Amino acid sequence: MSDQLPSYAQQASPVVRELVGALKELDEGAIARLLMPESEAEWAFRLFGMGPLLFLMFMHLECEEFVLPRFARRGPQEVLAEVGWVTGVDEEGRARYDPRRVSTVKLQRREGNWRISDVNPAPLDHQISVSEAQELLARAMQEGRGAEPLVFPWGVITGAFQLKRLGSEPLDQVERLFVEGMEHSEFGVPEIIRAVRLWREFKERASPIYRRPEVYAAGVEYVMTLFGFYGDSQVRIAERYGVSPASISSKWHEIERALSLSQFDRRYSVDEDPGVGLEAMLRQQGVDPPPPVPLGTGRGVRTYDFSLPRDRL
């Protein structure tokens, strides 16, 4: 390893290389040991198996050699590493990689060791959010590129491409219902992860008693619909779950109150709060920031209408 690399990169590089090797070998045990507990990457692995990691790393394209062209550090506990897949060499014999197939691996330190906490299918200086992936996918659809393998990672993030659930994480009755329902409604992996965490934290805090798990499952999906600014109505969700719209209204408000939810709740929303910068500035000036935006403020629709059959991915 080059002595020119900063120490954090020298420490993180072997972990990223080990992850790529474990994914190539489909070694679930090795992958699990490399993931930061309770991180985005570990939750994706627990719920869906290796699929999300393989697609977000562009490994569905059967790439062989890779390079780690750039590293960045975010404080003492977080490192970003870029992974690029080699397509040849330049005139000076240096590896050349496809800039369209670059992923960023986020690592965090745990008990002195670096562990993988997230993978994003974009360069480290412009990682994409769910909303950006939706826009990119919509553009690809308009240009007739919707079925190209290069756009599959965006589909995994947005839910346009649904993965089979091959993870070992046990789900309760409510979770099984809303995970399946959210897959049908084309929610992406990040949103399904947050829905499971939301339900478990609500269940721990409120200890709900229910006869029909469908009612709470529908309530959870509606909450995630509100977080995503999607246009699905309580009536339509109620029809899919076989419950009444009134029961959904009751349950989602119950969840909202128990967890003190707001529209850009960092715990469960995939969207960044656009008012974060203003809030920080006001606090610096000793001014109280405005209250959080109520959940359900602003509604819209997904900007694409495309999905692949589950057996394709």
Image (spheres, helix red, strand yellow):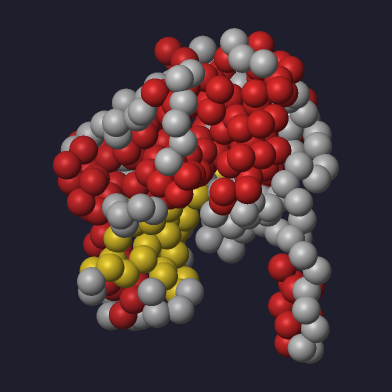
Residue 259 lies, with reference to residue 133, above or below; the image says: below
Q: Quadrant of residue 112?
A: bottom left
Q: Which residue appears at 74% of the width and 17% of the height? A: 235
- Regarding residue 306, the answer to whether it shows in the image is no
Percent of width and height locating residue 89: 41, 52
Q: Nearer the viewer, residue 93 or 47?
A: 47
The outermost residue toward the bottom is 285
Residue 80 lies, with reference to residue 247, above or below; the image says: below
Counting the numbered discs, the total is 0
Tell me: 271 left or right of 188: right
Q: Quadrant of residue 240?
A: top right
Q: Quadrant of residue 9?
A: bottom left
Percent of width and height locating residue 103: 47, 50
Q: Which residue appears at 61% of the width and 40% of the height? A: 254
Residue 51 lies, with reference to residue 87, above or below; the image says: above
Percent of width and height locating residue 250: 66, 31
Percent of width and height locating residue 157: 55, 37
